[in-house]
Amino acid sequence: MLQQLFSPSVLHTLDLIGIFVFAISGALLAVRKNFDVFGMAVLAEVTALGGGLFRDLVIGAVPPAAFTDLGYFVTPLLATVLVFFLHPHVERIQTGVNVFDAAGLGLFCVVGTTKAYDYGLGLTASACLGLATAVGGGVLRDVLANEVPSLLRWDRDLYAVPAIVGAAMTALCIRYDLLNPATSGVAVVTAFVLRLLAMRYHWRAPRAWHRRSTVREE
């Protein structure tokens, strides 16, 4: 089904762009944590490839693409080199990086859902793996850096929710036999725009009902 939506060359190019941007976010966190160059490379690789690796292992697409395509492995290293030498400049264009990160989020949630369905998973499981593809690397990055994962923190702008929406839209299109390049593009753009709006207006998920009346603030 993926081959019907994107040509192999287009899909590969989009994958590498998304991987590069995700890797930059991992390397930047390593700089903020005062990691050495090896730590930067590890966080860049994990952030960029973690979600896709998890998906491929679950669905049995082995060996995962990250181990069969050298470009997938080298791209995070290029991002590490860029951040190693130019991190003050990269920090100054963080807004631009976040925009590309949002685009990668939208792309990966759709591609992950579609690939999981291609390997025989049901629609709900496929959507869950689409979400994992989009956000899994960021979770691993934060865990390795000894941080509470961003998508679990109430004080961070919505990140997982846009990916959930994009994955759910993809699953519904598959269910009603509507998945094609146009509808998959709509799902990507919807997740992308929701993430941008969340960053612009600081949308956050609600906490427990009447939480402040019963639970002490941590």
Image (cartoon, rainbow, N blue to C red):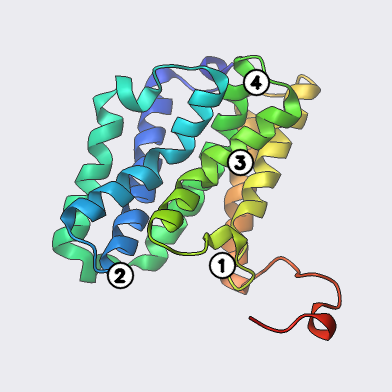
Q: Is residue 195 visible?
A: yes
Q: Position of residue 130 (x, y in %)?
A: 60, 35
Q: Residue at x 31, y 32 (%)?
A: 72
* Residues at discs 2 and 4 in contact (Cβ within 8 Å): no
Q: Earlier in the sequence, mark 3 or mark 1?
A: 3
The three-letter code of the residue at mark 1 reads Met
Q: Which residue is mark 2?
A: 32
Q: Position of residue 168 (x, y in %)?
A: 72, 38
Picture quadrant where residue 18 is located: top left
Q: Residue at x 73, y 23 (%)?
A: 174
Circle on res. 199:
1
| Residue sitting at the far left | 85
Q: Earlier in the sequence, mark 2 or mark 3?
A: 2
Q: Position of residue 179 (x, y in %)?
A: 69, 24
| The C terminus - image quarter | bottom right
> In front: 204, or 153?
153
Q: Earlier in the sequence, mark 3 or mark 4?
A: 4
Circle on res. 43:
none
Q: Which residue is mark 4?
A: 117
Of the two numbered discs 2 and 3 in the rendering, the one whose residue sits closer to the viewer: 2
The three-letter code of the residue at mark 3 reads Leu
Disc count in the image?
Answer: 4
Q: Which residue is mark 3?
A: 131
Picture quadrant where residue 183 is located: top right
Label 3 secondary element: helix
